Image (cartoon, rainbow, N blue to C red):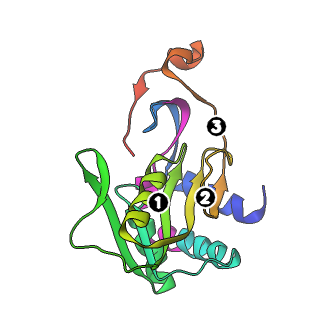
Amino acid sequence: MDARQTEILDIFTRTRALLQGHFVLRSGLHSGHYFQCAQVCQHMDAVERLAELLVEKVRTAGLTFQTVLAPGMGGLVIGQEVARQAKARYIFAEKENNVLVLRRGFTLTPGEPVLIVEDVVTRGGRVLECLEIVRQAGGRTVGIAMLVDRSAGSARFDVPAVSLLELSFPTYPADAVPPALAKLPIDKPGS
């Protein structure tokens, strides 16, 4: 792990955003580790630093955008801070009938370059929904920026994706939870 990744992991640990126990993730998978980014997002100095590092990584990847789109709830705070630092417009998607949609009068112009910003990606479900939102709204997704890629690179998208941290904690379907993990009380902290 390089110095930047160590710094990022330290931020998550210091803010108690990296939890251990028995968790059911938004994806329905079970895990002994959970990133509760809401914990880090209450510390604006940490949010500012993580966004600074993420914007740097996005620029290094050559991604240029006018608008940041974040899925609610997880990506809201980091998405807004990335947009602020990049001096970009910021919009968010939220659930309506259990599907992410643009509301509140948010629109995209034809071909508008959009960066999707998310906190943690395990399977990439919300990112895929956001990709479809941008497509249907006529915009153009230039890339995806995430704080943590829990998929260890297995979540694939049809646009470039960057993350600050790639960690692969084992995840298990409900019918294949190891006995030691199954003995722990289940926590579903929310995403």
Residue 68 placement (x, y as % from top left)? 44, 73
Residue to which mark 1 is pinned: 131
Residue 13 placement (x, y as % from top left)? 57, 51
Which residue shows up at 38% across the image and 33% down it?
A: 188
**Quadrant location of the N terminus?**
bottom right
Asked which secondary structure carries label 3, the reply is loop
Q: Amino acid at mark 2?
A: Asp
Can residue 106 be seen by looking at this rendering? yes
Q: Which mark is residue 158?
A: 2
Q: Amino acid at mark 1?
A: Leu
Mark 2 closeness class: few <14, some 14–19, many ≥20 residues within 10 Å: few
Q: CA distance from mark 2 to mark 3?
A: 24 Å
Which residue shows up at 51% across the image and 67% down it?
A: 46
Q: Nearer the viewer, residue 168 or 35?
A: 168
Which residue shows up at 28% across the image and 52% down it?
A: 95
Residue most extreme to the right:
2
Residue 164 placement (x, y as % from top left)? 64, 62
Can residue 43 be seen by looking at this rendering? no
Which residue shows up at 55% across the image and 54% down it?
A: 12
Q: Is residue 117 magenta?
A: no
Q: Which residues are magenta?
A: 29-48
Do residues under tags 2 and 1 come within 8 Å of each other at their CB atoms?
A: yes
Who comes first in sequence, dot 2 or dot 3?
Answer: 2
Q: Which mark is residue 51?
A: none
Asked which secondary structure carries label 1, the reply is helix
Q: Nearer the viewer, residue 41 or 165?
A: 165
Residue to which mark 3 is pinned: 169
